[in-house]
Image (spheres, helix red, strand yellow):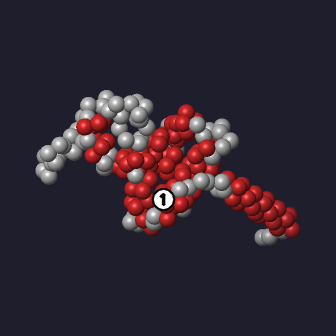
């Protein structure tokens, strides 16, 4: 039975929830502005929004970070050179709608919400590499199996995008399949023997 007290209590809770959602919407709008994206790259996107490309670039830089400086002899190519973000964009564009929706939601959560739960005030793409690693370590070590699974799936997608390029194989000590092998090998000389 609905009493006046129950009605007022529910109305107050609904008003508080609406105010919270409105505040979150304003915060998300403010946090989702100010992204700088190369127009040529943005024009080729099939699935990702330009701001999501910035997030995916930041995630790729952390997931696929080299153990040596990229300008040192034998260093592997950067995730940007390999086109990891473009691979993720294409993969999601060709994926099932549910997979696409969940991955895009994960990118948004990692960019805007999860860094705050780790004590960082800025969005993921604006954090230092060390702070980004802190956020990703927290996600990987979360008590939530759902968050651990999100980390594992996300990392696998990015690594698949990185290691699909023969220039990255030298890091693994792999010089590609024998079938269809070019005379000079799959891995360019610069990347052979990198440790």
Q: Quadrant of the N terminus?
A: bottom right
Residue 97 placement (x, y as % from top left):
45, 67
For the question of whether residue 30 can be seen, the reply is yes
Question: Is label 1 in a helix, a strand or a loop?
Answer: helix
Q: Residue shown at 26%/41% (left/top)?
A: 188
Residue 189 placement (x, y as % from top left):
25, 37
Q: Residue shown at 31%/29% (left/top)?
A: 195
Does residue 193 sit above or below 44 in this rendering?
above
Q: Nearer the viewer, residue 194 or 65?
A: 194
Q: Residue shown at 40%/61% (left/top)?
A: 90
Residue lying at the far right of the rendered structure: 4
Total labels: the figure holds: 1
Residue lying at the far bottom of the rendered structure: 1
For the question of whether residue 48 can be seen, the reply is no
Q: Residue shown at 63%/46% (left/top)?
A: 123
Instruction: Tell me if mark 1 has few (under 14), some (14-19) or many (20+) residues whose alpha carbon lies within 10 angstroms of its own.
Output: few
Does residue 65 sit above or below 31 in this rendering?
above
Residue 57 placement (x, y as % from top left):
49, 49
Residue 180 placement (x, y as % from top left):
14, 52
**Which residue is labeled 1 in the image?**
41
């Amino acid at each position: 039975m609905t009493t006046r007290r129950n009605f007022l209590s529910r109305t107050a809770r609904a008003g508080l929830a609406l105010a919270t959602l409105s505040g979150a919407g304003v915060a998300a709008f403010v946090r989702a502005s100010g992204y700088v994206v190369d127009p040529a790259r943005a024009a080729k996107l099939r699935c990702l929004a330009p701001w999501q490309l910035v997030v995916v670039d930041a995630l790729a830089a952390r997931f696929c970070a080299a153990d040596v400086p990229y300008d040192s002899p034998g260093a592997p190519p950067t995730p940007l050179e390999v086109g990891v973000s473009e691979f993720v964009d294409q993969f999601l564009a060709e994926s099932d709608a549910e997979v696409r929706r969940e991955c895009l939601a994960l990118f948004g959560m990692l960019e805007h919400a999860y860094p705050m739960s780790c004590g960082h005030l800025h969005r993921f793409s604006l954090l230092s590499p060390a702070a980004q690693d802190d956020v990703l370590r927290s996600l990987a070590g979360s008590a939530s199996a759902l968050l651990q699974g999100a980390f594992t799936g996300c990392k696998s997608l990015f690594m698949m995008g990185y290691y699909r390029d023969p220039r990255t194989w030298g890091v693994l000590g792999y010089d590609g399949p024998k079938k269809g092998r070019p005379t000079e090998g799959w891995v360019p000389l610069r990347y052979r023997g990198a440790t």
